[in-house]
Amino acid sequence: MQHKPDEQIRQRLEDLSDDSLDLERVWKRIEEPKASKKGYWPLQVGMAAVLGVLVGYFIHQPAEQPASAKPAATLAQKPSAVTPERTNVIPETLYANPPQLPENAPLPEQAQVTEKTGTEIPVTLDSLPVIQPSPFIQPTDVPVIVQKNQPIESFEATVTLTIPEPKQETQLRKKSILARIFGSEKKSDQRPQWQEFKSPAALGKAKVDSLKRRP
Amino acid sequence: MNLSDLLARCRVQDVKAQRLVYERYAGRLFRVAQRYMKDRMEAEDMLVSAFQRIFEHLKKFEYKDEAATWVWMKTILVNQCLMELRRSANFTMVPENEAPDQPFTYSILDEIAAETIQKVIMELPIGYRTVFNLVALEGYTHTEVAKQLQISEGTSKSQLNKARQLLQKKLQALGYAAQTR
């Protein structure tokens, strides 16, 4: 059952004066929607998260400077690195100005100890990978370097070639295939022959047309 | 300046006109919000968000008369309140196998001061109060209330019955004789 609203009571309730409402303060809140809006914190959290992700992304990106951009600082030009050629000859330019170490330069602690005792302290670096011989890979012989002008030594080698013998294919005859498919013996036809059929009337199952028998 | 001109100026973001509209309706809307919400602060929050929505959607509103404008503004406010209540309150807590729907007259309330009625309504539990406000005072149907509050029609009816019973008890406690026809 529906109830009709009491218009009078509603009107009285709405017309109640309320002096406690601070019109000025509420108006300021209306004017500043961002500060006063409740329930928008998820949006703010989301914005902060997106901002964080973007900052993280750009921080971890490799520094890519566009070609047109001016460098902030210019470095002194380094001498171009000498790329060794594919020869065994070491270029003389590397020995032209050998690096000279200062004679009275302070030695590191390890070097001083080595100098005093005359023995080298083994230094192990755990961070470097240690190559262990794999038990599954058999070591191969180290190849001997042979000079070009060295005479060729004679050697003997035994090579065993296994050539498979060609199989003799037996050509099946048509007869044998047919025999396998249809059987070796020809079976007699068991199906009823047309001569064995009898008319329905002879069997007494056919309807007799009474009209035809009328004279 | 008449209301139509005021609203036309509000549409072009005239702050002075908006302020005038606000001063004209804020008190009444605040009273409505107070009937729905738990306390003054919540009612004030709803008033703020309702006015923001009113000024935002004023472009779509077609002015007919002052009464229609008031109903439009109040609907926006009530919707804001219901959205907040849906978010915070649980309307499905009350069982539905309650007293059958009985005829009820609100003539008793005619003799009582509006402040007292407002006070008694605001003392009702949130579920009762919301349905009472919507059905008894605003004139919504139970189907509409059920849809608005995302509850069943039975729950809406049950809440209204309980609200009326509690209202009568409270008025009796205040010394007013309950009348049911």
Image (cartoon, coloured by chain):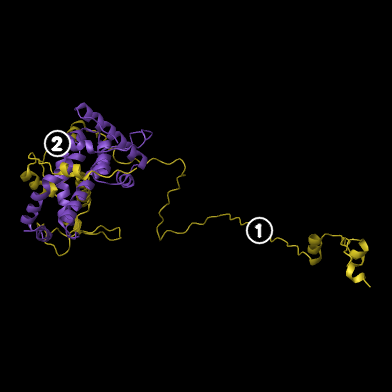
Pinpoint residue B165: horizontal percent, then vertical percent. 28, 32
Question: Does residue A199 lie above or below A24 as drawn?
Answer: below
Q: CA distance from mark 2 to mark 1?
A: 114 Å
Which residue carries the number 2 mark?
A: B115
Question: On the picture, is A58 further left or further right than A160?
Answer: left
Q: Hey, what amino acid is under mark 1?
A: Pro
* Dot 1 crowding, Cα within 10 Å, few <14, some 14–19, many 20+: few
Question: Does residue A139 lie above or below B62 as drawn?
Answer: above
Given residues A206 and B175, the one toward you in this image is B175
In the displayed orientation, state which residue is furthest to the bottom.
A215
Residue A164 circle label: 1
In the rendered image, which quarter is residue A77 located in? bottom left
**Could you tell me which residue is drawn at 30 percent across and 58 percent down?**
A88
Helix, strand or loop at label 1? It is loop
**Could you tell me which residue is drawn at 89 percent across and 67 percent down?**
A210
Q: Which chain is purple?
A: B
Q: Quadrant of the C terminus of chain A?
A: bottom right
Pinpoint residue A199: horizontal percent, then vertical percent. 90, 66
Question: Does residue B135 lie above or below A58 as drawn?
Answer: above
Q: Hey, what amino acid is under mark 2?
A: Glu
Question: Can residue A124 be seen from the camera position used here?
Answer: no
Given residues B29 and B66, the one toward you in this image is B66
Question: Does residue B51 lie above or below A106 as drawn?
Answer: below
Q: Which colour is chain A painted?
A: yellow
Given residues A174 and B108, the one toward you in this image is B108
